Amino acid sequence: MQIDISGLHQLASQASASTKKLFKKLKQRTPANLDQQVEQFHEEVFSYTDCLTCANCCKTTSPVFTSKDIERIARHLRLKPGQFIHQYLHIDEEGDYVLNTAPCPFLHADHTCQIYEQRPSACQQYPHTNRKKFHQILDLTVCNTYICPAAFQIVEKLKKLYT
């Protein structure tokens, strides 16, 4: 099932109460096979999802940049880490380095990424639906359902399984 990105925010808003209810239940009693189930849904959804047709994450949000990310990307761009930070990043209210602007300055019009091979680890892992200890990022996943159609679909599959 493909989701029209223009209607995703409304869909996620409508589903928010049931998503939060499920996630509260999963926090209280995490099923032993939750990680495997989420990874299975991740593989299924991403078998028909092409991120290059969407790129909503790159258009609307910033990843967190680690020191290693900054060093790697700066080297690739032939900048000193301080120059890279000055030109592209700022520290947010949580003390993390994030992009100054959205959409991402490295996003091309065709939704490809100028720094794809060196992209931040947060970009590499997004939307974080195939990671271990999924129960630890349920709050982040709620946010991601508003941004990523694949994350939304994975959560909807979890609802059918656990409610």
Image (cartoon, rainbow, N blue to C red):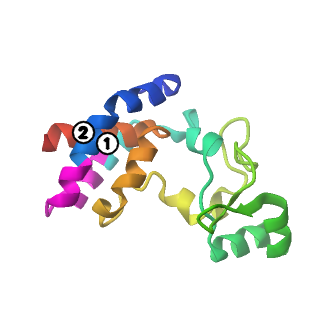
Which is the main secondary structure of the residues drawn in magenta? helix
Residue matched to label 2: 157
User: Tag 1: Cα neighbours inside 10 Å, few (<14), some, or many (≥20)?
Assistant: many
Q: CA distance from mark 1 to mark 2?
A: 5 Å
Near-viewer residue (2 or 18)? 18
Q: Residue at x 39, y 43 (%)?
A: 151
Q: Are marks 1 and 2 in contact (CB under 8 Å)?
A: yes
Whole-percent x and y of residue 148? 47, 40
- Residue 79 in sight from this viewpoint: no
Q: Secondary structure at mark 2?
A: helix
Image coords of residue 96 (percent x, y): 62, 67
Is 24 magenta? The answer is yes
In the figure, is residue 95 to the left or right of 155? Answer: right
Would you name the residue on which mark 1 appears? 154
Q: Specify the amino acid type for callout 2.
A: Lys
Quarter the N terminus occupies: top left
Q: What range is drawn magenta here?
A: 23-41
| Looking at the image, residue 24 lies above or below residue 46 | below
Q: Is residue 135 visible?
A: yes
What residue is at 38 percent from the left and 46 percent from the top? 142
* Secondary structure under the numbered disc 1 in the rendered image: helix
Q: Is residue 153 left or right of residue 161?
A: right
Residue at the extreme front of the image, as rendered: 93
